């Protein structure tokens, strides 16, 4: 496991030093500052005339912030990983690595693990920061916060796995286009499923479910947002961060299996590639 640990460490440290990752981290920090200021002003001037209205108000703004965090996580994951294998194949760096006593499966899994650790750290820091802001200013904590954070990490792992898988065969540009298109399709599938639930249209529901099975990233966010909202907000309807229904726990199991299957295929493809 020495080779795997070495690749993991190198990938994690390299990701920390990349300007792209630092830029996204700075954007995240700036967003937390702006959210704190905006939320404090809104909270100070808000009036809660209806009993029980205050928790819904707090959760509504929290989920807006978490939605932005979720988008930043997706961007960070894809942009940081899209060339971690494809770029090194083009530059010839990968040839130096695989000629050493490091097996190809260790290269794939080590890079995946290093980037996964970086992504998970970003999710935890940003999510806990967002919740801490709402807790300190508004005295509110959403239901099931740990489950929500875990599902956001799983969403990032799905996108990371797709990017690593594509990098074993595609160029950096082609891989980036494919993964971003997949992310967009998954996003559209989530809206289709919500619309289908509102309209009670089985055809739309089937289309959304099929796409979500092919690319289960958005389904993880919808499950996370559903769990972190009180029942009242769950029934609000059609929005990026709430809905009348949520993917079942079976979809979560599928997403975890999706990551495992994707990594298995990525290792197999990389072992068969001529370098």
Image (tube, rainbow, N blue to C red):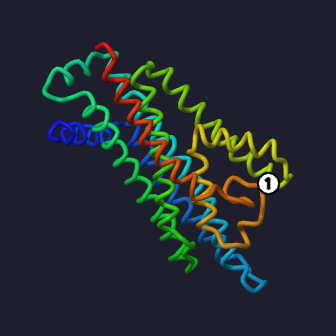
Numbered label tally: 1
Image point (35%, 42%), residue name? 115
Q: Is residue 153 left or right of residue 201?
A: left
Q: Is residue 225 above or below residue 215?
A: below
In the orientation shown, which residue stands out farthest toward the bottom? 51
Given residues 249 and 119, the one toward you in this image is 249
Q: Quadrant of residue 121?
A: bottom left
Q: Which residue is mark 1?
A: 197
Q: Compared to 47, does 101 lie above or below?
A: above
Residue 136 x/y as whole percent? 50, 77
Q: Is residue 177 left or right of residue 105?
A: right
Q: Secondary structure at mark 1?
A: helix
Above or below residue 145? Residue 107 is above
Taking depth in this image into account, of 62 and 146 the one nearest to the observer is 146
Where does the N terminus fall, quadrant-wise? top left
Q: Position of residue 251 (x, y in %)?
A: 58, 52
- Give the residue displayed 49% in from the left and 25% down from the top: 175
Structural crowding at the residue carrying mark 1, measured as other residues with C-alpha within 10 Å and reported as few (<14), some (14–19) or many (≥20): some
How far across and how far down the image is residue 193, in percent?
Answer: 74, 48
Q: Look at the picture and state if 65 lies above or below 163.
A: below
Q: Residue at x 53, y 54 (%)?
A: 252
Residue 38, image x, y percentages: 61, 64
User: Looking at this rendering, what residue extends furthest in the top direction?
Assistant: 274
**Quarter of the rendering occupied by the C terminus:** top left
Q: Residue at x 47, y 49 (%)?
A: 256
Instruction: Give the camera-side residue of 216 and 59.
Output: 216
């Amino acid at each position: 496991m020495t080779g795997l640990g070495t690749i993991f460490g190198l990938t994690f440290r390299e990701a920390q030093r990349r300007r792209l990752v630092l830029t996204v981290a700075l954007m995240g920090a700036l967003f937390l500052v702006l959210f704190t200021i905006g939320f404090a002003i809104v909270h100070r001037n808000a009036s809660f005339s209806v009993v029980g209205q205050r928790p819904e108000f707090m959760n509504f703004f929290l989920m807006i912030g978490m939605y932005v965090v979720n988008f930043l996580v997706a961007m960070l994951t894809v942009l940081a990983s899209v060339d971690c294998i494809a770029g090194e194949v083009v530059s010839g760096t990968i040839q130096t690595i695989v000629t050493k006593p490091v097996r190809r499966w260790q290269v794939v899994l080590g890079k995946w693990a290093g980037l996964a650790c970086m992504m998970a750290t970003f999710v935890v820091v940003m999510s806990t920061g967002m919740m801490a802001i709402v807790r300190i200013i508004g005295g509110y904590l959403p239901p099931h916060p740990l489950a929500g954070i875990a599902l956001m990490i799983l969403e990032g792992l799905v996108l990371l796995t797709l990017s690593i898988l594509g990098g074993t065969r595609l160029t950096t540009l082609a891989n980036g286009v494919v993964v971003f298109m997949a992310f967009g399709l998954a996003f559209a599938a989530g809206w289709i499923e919500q619309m289908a639930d509102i309209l009670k249209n089985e055809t739309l529901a089937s289309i959304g479910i099929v796409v979500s099975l092919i690319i289960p990233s958005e389904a993880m966010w919808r499950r996370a947002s559903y769990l972190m909202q009180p029942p009242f907000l769950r029934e609000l309807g059609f929005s990026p961060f709430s809905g009348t229904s949520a993917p079942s726990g079976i979809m979560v199991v599928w997403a975890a299996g999706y990551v495992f299957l994707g990594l298995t295929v990525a290792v197999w493809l990389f072992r068969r590639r001529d370098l």
